């Protein structure tokens, strides 16, 4: 509670920090925190609870001990608590009304009541003052032991931390189609012994549930999303080391990928390392998130199969607005930096495709950020 701590420090500005006043300051802070927690539990929001907590203790002039050695003084200024017994054993004035004890209250215990008790029985706070460092040390040691134990398990079993812990039950990713064989790698499949954290609806943009259904951004995916999920490395392996000059083979590669039936205007003459193409008149029934995922996957697959291509230019139109063109420029260096690995034929295998898809492409905001950076304005 940094705000309450700063407020208590402000109350004690200009006061003599005797051992008794230091102890008093900690007691006031503890009582303010307790009052704040009571207000929160009663249904107030944080800002209102903070405000009411501060209002309960606007001054410490009633309780501060300016000169602890002058214990024989019976006089106090203003509303100081004058009924606290001094060292000579003088008791409270029986005719004086205690303003703290007579104040009615329905909510959390007033702070000043606890402070008065502190002055009457200062020796009771000493054991607590000596105990809390020991308790804190025990907690820190326990956390350290837990951290060391988790780190050891991570090293032993290859466990990775969740991107986001959402408190929900982890949902396992199942193979979408176990019969696709050695030539493909479904998004739900994993290599033997791979213990990467299981994707969930919270930490993944694309998610495959235990029934094999594809979800995109929390909604059931369309056929294009399923096509991206089902696309395996086996198809790409047939086109590894494709030469940009071989236009027919380049076009065959593009048509084997998701959205391939809409691929057109394939141009390999833009430069020695530039590939240009278009996806024309995409059906309006296709979801925008699925189209972005297909774009990201196709670009990744081309970079893996064609190591000499460093730039892919793509024009995209939809059937309902054929003249409204979107233009994208994907650069190899930018795409590789997002994956954190070189995109080449060494990734065209089961483990590599798992890394491309489940460890990156399916993760939240990965596709969106990759496509947003590539989108350009027509000049």
Image (cartoon, rainbow, N blue to C red):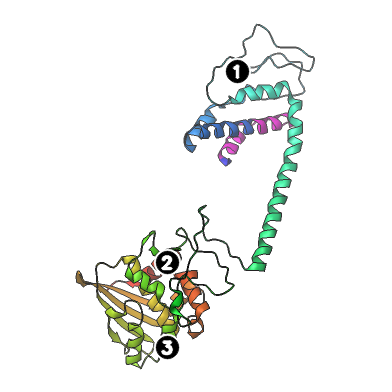
Q: Which comes sooner in the sequence, label 2 or label 1?
A: 1
Q: Which residues are magenta?
A: 3-27
The reply to whether callout 2 and callout 1 are in contact (CB within 8 Å) is: no
Q: In this rendering, does residue 368 appear at all? A: yes
Q: What is the secondary structure assignment of the residue under circle 3?
A: loop
Q: Position of residue 182 (x, y in %)?
A: 48, 82
In the rendered image, which quarter is residue 282 located in? bottom left
Residue that extends furthest to the front in the rendered view of this protein: 179
Disc 2 or disc 1, which is closer to the eye? 2
Of 269 and 174, the residue lying toward us: 174
> Where in the figure is residue 310, as x and y percent of width and height?
41, 83
Relative image position of residue 85 (x, y in whole percent): 73, 16
Quarter of the C terminus within the rendering: bottom left
Disc marking residue 100: 1
The residue singled out by tag 2 in the image is: 212
Residue for point 40% across, 68% down: 367
Classify 10 Å Cα crowding around label 3: few (below 14), some (14-19), many (20 and above).
few
Instruction: For the residues labelled 2 and 3, say whether their Cβ atoms are less than 8 Å apart.
Output: no
**Mark 1, mark 3: which one is toward the viewer?**
3
Q: Is residue 8 found inside the magenta-colored segment of the image?
A: yes
Q: Main SS of the magenta segment?
A: helix
Which secondary structure lies at badge 2? loop
182 relative to 2, above or below: below
**Residues marked 1 and 3 touching at CB (< 8 Å):** no
């Amino acid at each position: 509670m940094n705000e309450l701590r700063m407020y208590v420090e402000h109350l004690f500005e200009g006061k003599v920090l005797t051992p008794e006043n230091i102890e008093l300051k900690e007691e006031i802070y503890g009582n303010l925190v307790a009052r704040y927690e009571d207000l929160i539990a009663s249904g107030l929001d944080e800002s209102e609870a903070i405000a009411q907590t501060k209002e309960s203790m606007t001054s410490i002039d009633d309780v501060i001990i300016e000169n602890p050695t002058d214990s024989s003084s019976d006089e106090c200024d203003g509303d100081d608590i004058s009924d606290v017994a001094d060292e000579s054993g003088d008791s409270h004035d029986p005719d004086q009304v205690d303003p703290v004890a007579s104040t009615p209250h329905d909510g959390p215990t007033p702070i000043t009541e606890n402070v008065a008790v502190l002055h009457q029985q200062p020796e009771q706070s000493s054991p607590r003052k000596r105990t809390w460092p020991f308790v804190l040390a025990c907690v820190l040691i326990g956390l350290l032991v837990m951290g060391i134990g988790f780190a050891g398990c991570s090293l032993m079993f290859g466990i990775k931390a969740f991107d986001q812990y959402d408190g929900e039950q982890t949902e396992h990713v199942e193979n979408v189609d176990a019969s696709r064989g050695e030539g493909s790698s479904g998004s739900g499949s994993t290599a033997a012994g791979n213990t990467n954290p299981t994707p969930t609806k919270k930490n993944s943009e694309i998610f495959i549930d235990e029934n094999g259904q594809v979800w995109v951004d929390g909604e059931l995916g369309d056929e294009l999303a399923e096509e991206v999920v089902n696309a395996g490395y086996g198809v790409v392996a047939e086109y590894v080391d494709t030469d940009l000059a071989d236009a027919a083979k380049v076009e065959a590669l593009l048509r084997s990928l998701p959205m391939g039936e809409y691929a057109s205007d394939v141009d390999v003459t833009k430069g020695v390392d530039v590939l240009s193409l278009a996806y024309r008149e995409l059906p309006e029934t296709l979801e925008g998130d699925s189209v972005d995922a297909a774009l990201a996957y196709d670009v990744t697959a081309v970079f893996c199969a064609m190591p000499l291509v460093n730039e892919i230019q793509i024009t995209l139109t939809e059937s309902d607005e054929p003249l409204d063109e979107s233009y994208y420029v994907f650069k190899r260096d930018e795409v590789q930096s997002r994956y954190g690995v070189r995109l080449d034929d060494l990734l065209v295998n089961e483990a590599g495709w798992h890394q491309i898809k489940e460890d990156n492409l399916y993760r939240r905001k990965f596709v969106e950020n990759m496509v947003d950076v590539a989108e350009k304005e027509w000049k």
